[in-house]
Image (spheres, rainbow, N blue to C red):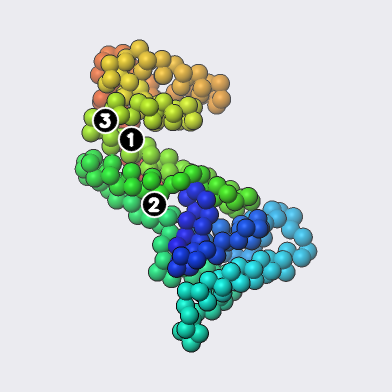
Amino acid sequence: MEIEVLGTLEVRLQGVSVTPTAPKPRRVLALLALHAGRVVSVASLTEELWGATPPRSARTTLQTYVLQLRELIGTALEQTEPDPEMRRTAKSVLATVPGGYLLDSGEGVSDVLEFQRLSGLGYRAMDAGDFPEAARHLREALALWSGPAFADVQVGEQLQMEVKRLEETRLCALDQRIEADLRLGRHRDLLAELTVLTNRYPTHENLYGQFMLALHRSGRRSEALEAYQRMRTNLVRELGLEPSADLQRVQRMILMARPEAALAAAANGTRERLLRSR
C-alpha cells in the first residue's frame, strides 16, 4: 500500500487508488492511513466525523463508511491480485478489531514514515557536524511535502490536531536544513526563501534569526537590523512579547559585526529542543 498525506490524500493498493471522493469516508480513510498498522478507536473516528455531539446513528453510519472503503479496497484487490485463492480480503486490509479499526498497509510506503526517517538522519548528521549530509537528508525529507498535510480533506478535530503536529515537524526540519545551509556558506542562496518564510511566519524567531544572519553575511547589515525590528513589532503586536534572549543576542552581535557566535548558540538550543521532543 502506498500512503500519501503530506499534501493531498492518496492511498493506493499496488497503484490502484482506494481513496474515496465523498468527504466523510475520505476523513475516515485519512485518519486510518495516518495511523496505518495501528488501531484507530471508534471514539476517535466518531469525534473526527461529528465532534462532541455525534448523532445516535453515529456507529451505524461509521460502519457504512467503513463498508464503502472496503468496497474500494475489494475492487483494487481484484485488479491487482487476480488469483482468487491467493487474494487477500478487504476485511483483512481494513480490519475490525476490538474497540476500532486497523488499516494493514503491509510492507508498503508512507510519506510520513519516510519523512520521519530522512529528517531523523538529518538531525543526527547535524549533531555530528556533517552539514552536507544534514542538508541533503533534510532537503529530501522536505521534498516529500507537496502542500499542507491533508490539503484536500475537510478535517475534523482529530485530523486538525494531526495537521498541526505534522506542520510543526516540517518547520523543525526546515529550520535545521536552513541552519545546515548557513553552515555551508549558502547565505545568498537562502535570501529569497527566507524572505518568503519570514512573511509567512511573522513570529517565528529562528527563521528571523537565520534571515538576519543571511542578510548580514551578504553585506546587508542595515536590512538585517530592520528585520529584527520588524520581528519585534510582530511579537509585541500579536503576542505581547519581546524577542527572546537568543534573538536579542543575534541583534547585538550584528551591531558588533560578530553574529556567528550568537547564531551558533541559538542553533544549539534548537537542536537540544529537537532531541528532547523525539
Residue 129 visible in the displayed image: yes
Which secondary structure lies at badge 3? loop
Amino acid of disc 3: Arg
Residue lying furthest right = 56
Left or right for 86, reference 22: left
Residue 178 image label: 1
User: Which of pointers 1 and 3 indicates the residue nearer the eye?
Assistant: 3
Mark 1 or mark 3: name the one nearer the start of the chain.
1
Q: Is 55 located above or below residue 200 in the figure?
A: below
Could you tell me residue 67's position as x and y percent? 64, 71
Callout 1 touching callout 3 (CB < 8 Å):
no
Density class for disc 1 (Cα within 10 Å; few <14, some 14-19, many ≥20) is many
Residue found 50% across the figure and 18% down from its top: 233
Amino acid of disc 1: Ile
State the separation of the CA atoms marked 1 and 3.
9 Å
Amino acid of disc 2: Phe
In depth, the one of 215 and 242 nearer the eye is 215
Could you tell me residue 2's position as x and y percent? 45, 62
Left or right for 134, reference 14: left
Residue topped by disc 3: 186
Residue topped by disc 2: 115
Residue found 55% across the figure and 65% down from its top: 18
In depth, the one of 43 and 101 nearer the eye is 101
Which secondary structure lies at badge 2? helix
Density class for disc 2 (Cα within 10 Å; few <14, some 14-19, many ≥20) is many
Mark 2 or mark 3: name the one nearer the start of the chain.
2
Image quadrant occupied by the N terminus = bottom left
Which secondary structure lies at badge 1? helix
